[in-house]
Image (cartoon, helix red, strand yellow):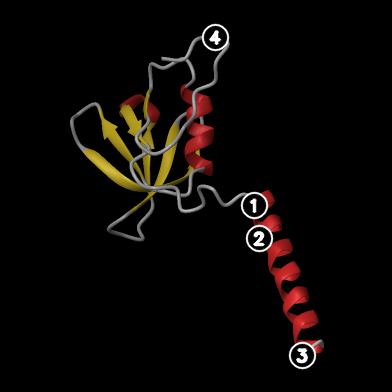
Amino acid sequence: MANAFEKREFVQGVSLRVSDADFYDGLRAVVDYRGDCKILLKDGSEAEGYIFNFTKLCVDLIPVDSEQRKSFLISNIAEIIFSGADAAAGKSWEDWMKRKAAQKSHQAASSDAASHA
């Protein structure tokens, strides 16, 4: 459990309990997460899919097995698990810019080599 001075990293495998002090920070991270999450309800049932929105009262999810959007009252949720891999993990804007610059550099070098041949 993170202390008051330490922010928790919300990545695949992390569990977010409604009782956690950083629950709403975790919900913001859930919405930004580009992988599936599993919602465990207090009644023992569960749902898995992409969480695309939340309010103070509910969490909205697109289930993995349906296009039908579902809403879950936060008061009925026991836990949310970052269950699927984040499809954009490690793909930051800065990384993209570095790759693009490297491609341009490689293309320029190839072009120079071809013109001197």
Label 4 sits on a secondary structure element that is loop
Q: Is residue 76 above or below residue 93?
A: above
Disc 4: which residue: 4
Disc 3: which residue: 117
Give, as a three-letter code, the residue at label 1. Asp
Q: Earlier in the sequence, mark 3 or mark 4?
A: 4
Label 1 sits on a secondary structure element that is helix
Q: At which x and y percent is residue 32?
A: 53, 43
Q: At which x and y percent is residue 42?
A: 24, 26
Give, as a three-letter code, the residue at label 4. Ala
Q: Tell me how far mark 1 sits from mark 3, CA to CA.
A: 33 Å
Contact flag, marks 1 and 2 (Cβ < 8 Å): yes
Label 2 sits on a secondary structure element that is helix
Q: Residue shown at 81%/88% (left/top)? A: 115
Image quadrant occupied by the C terminus: bottom right
Image quadrant occupied by the N terminus: top left
Q: Is residue 105 above or below residue 17?
A: below
Q: Tell me how far mark 4 sits from mark 2, CA to CA.
A: 37 Å
Q: Quadrant of residue 57?
A: top left
Disc 2: which residue: 99
Disc 1: which residue: 95
Q: Tell me how far mark 2 sits from mark 3, CA to CA.
A: 27 Å
Q: Residue shown at 81%/87% (left/top)? A: 116
Q: Tell me how far mark 3 sits from mark 4, CA to CA.
A: 63 Å
Query: For mark 3, does the 10 Å Cα neighbourhood hold few (<14), some (14 to 19), or many (20 or more) residues?
Result: few
